[in-house]
Amino acid sequence: MHRRQPMRVIEFDRVSKAYRLGMGHSSLRETLARQAQRLIRRRSSIHDEPPFWALNEVSFQVEQGEILGIIGHNGAGKSTILKLLSRVTFPTSGQIVTRGRMAALIELGAGFHPDLSGRENIYLNGVILGLKRREIDAQFDKIVEFAELEQFIDTPVKRYSSGMYVRLAFAVAAHVRADLILVDEVLSVGDAAFQQRCLTKMHELHRDGATIVLVSHNLWSVSTFCNRSLLLRAGRIVAEGHPVEVIQNYRQQEREAALARVQGQVANGATRDGACNQEPIAFAVKSELLNAEGKPERAFSPDDALILRITYVAPQPIETPAFVVQIRRADGVICCFIKSSADDVPQGVYGEGSVVLRIDPLQLVPDMYTIDVRLEDQRRALVYANDTGGIFHVKGYLEGAGIGGVFQPRARWLHPSDEWHPVPARSGGGQQ
């Protein structure tokens, strides 16, 4: 007996999409404006410019029941793929085949009429998505409940907040029982609780047989929700496979690019220092990353010590100074916040000087990090100066692609023969 092969829901075959910059003609108003511009300036200034290729010879397939995550920097071509799949635009070359009923959530409030109420827009969107009136009636209460808009369902959507818009748009798309669901980054508009409900709902849709394509910058969502991922760069697929491996590739590229930018900034900064000496003296802080031997360093291991030397210029005395250090992961997650106390730094900071912070061991998981420093007055809650953007990376494999936390504590598993002594619990009760 032959096993039935899964059906291909999406076939993307050598698809390219080119835009001629400044040549949009999507409406009568834009066309008239273009004709007016041609009367003022030479046509050759536009036509001589080469086209911008948003996608270039992209090919992939999606099987029924898959959850495909598409990641990459802004402008890599992610949203272009969703627009092509949903036929918002059409390819310059190549062929696209999709099968089954499709629901697309690729733009905030797409398909909504601002003067219609939420109730009317549910029916309008349902018809656009291919539902019959009785199907919309059957799902109406569930849509309103999911969107949490019972009180505002008869209010024109032009009075909705962005969060209300996206809740209603997702609720409609999630209840049409589509075979293929396209989801863009618009879910980031909702709060954390709503995003979690959306993920839970998409899990339910997947269990019911839906195929899902998700575009997101939230690598945690991609790694935990998707079973396959594509990495785009400059309109091409540069990695494809298991989400964790693809995200690892992506973060490694980010790390290398960031280090290259830092090296360029350091080189440019050396040429600007002389000119700065001619400017009026102002409050300033400057941070320098050093290794345990006191040498400049940008790459550390989790067990290494990181030395941060902070030099400052204070043209006026600061009676109660404090130095604040914040370390952030490449995606903006705050890893640690360190603030000096009155016992850590000299009081009455004035003139030029320096302080040193030693973090030993660093104990951050391998990834890319940014370190920010500021000088403030504790008593007056006044920030005098800051130094932002010092970048370093922690060497090693990005286990879990940066999604498994930021702290790497020293720990070991104990063998049954190892001696260990549990800490006795405190006895309760009142005063003796």
Image (tube, grey):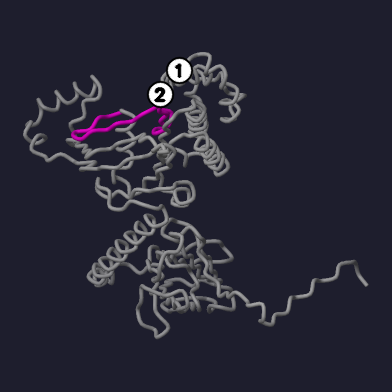
Q: Nearer the viewer, residue 186 or 58?
A: 58
For the record, the magenta segment spans 88-110
Question: What type is the residue that disc 1 sits on?
Answer: Leu
Judge by depth and name the residue closer to the eye, 222 or 355. 222
Residue closest to the far right: 432
Please provide percent x and percent y for residue 95. Answer: 23, 33
Q: Residue farthest to the front?
A: 1
Q: Residues within 10 Å of mark 2 (few under 14, many from 20)?
A: some
Q: Give the residue number, with chain letter if any, for mark 1.
A: 124
Q: Residue 366 is drawn in which quadrant?
A: bottom left
Q: What residue is shown at x 30% (from left), y 36% (from top)? A: 11
At x 40%, y 53%, the residue is 242
Q: Name the secondary structure under disc 1.
A: helix
Q: Of callouts 1 and 2, which one flags the residue occurring earlier in the amino acid sequence?
A: 2
Q: Nearer the viewer, residue 369 or 225?
A: 225
Instruction: Check if mark 1's residue and mark 2's residue have beta carbons within 8 Å.
Output: yes
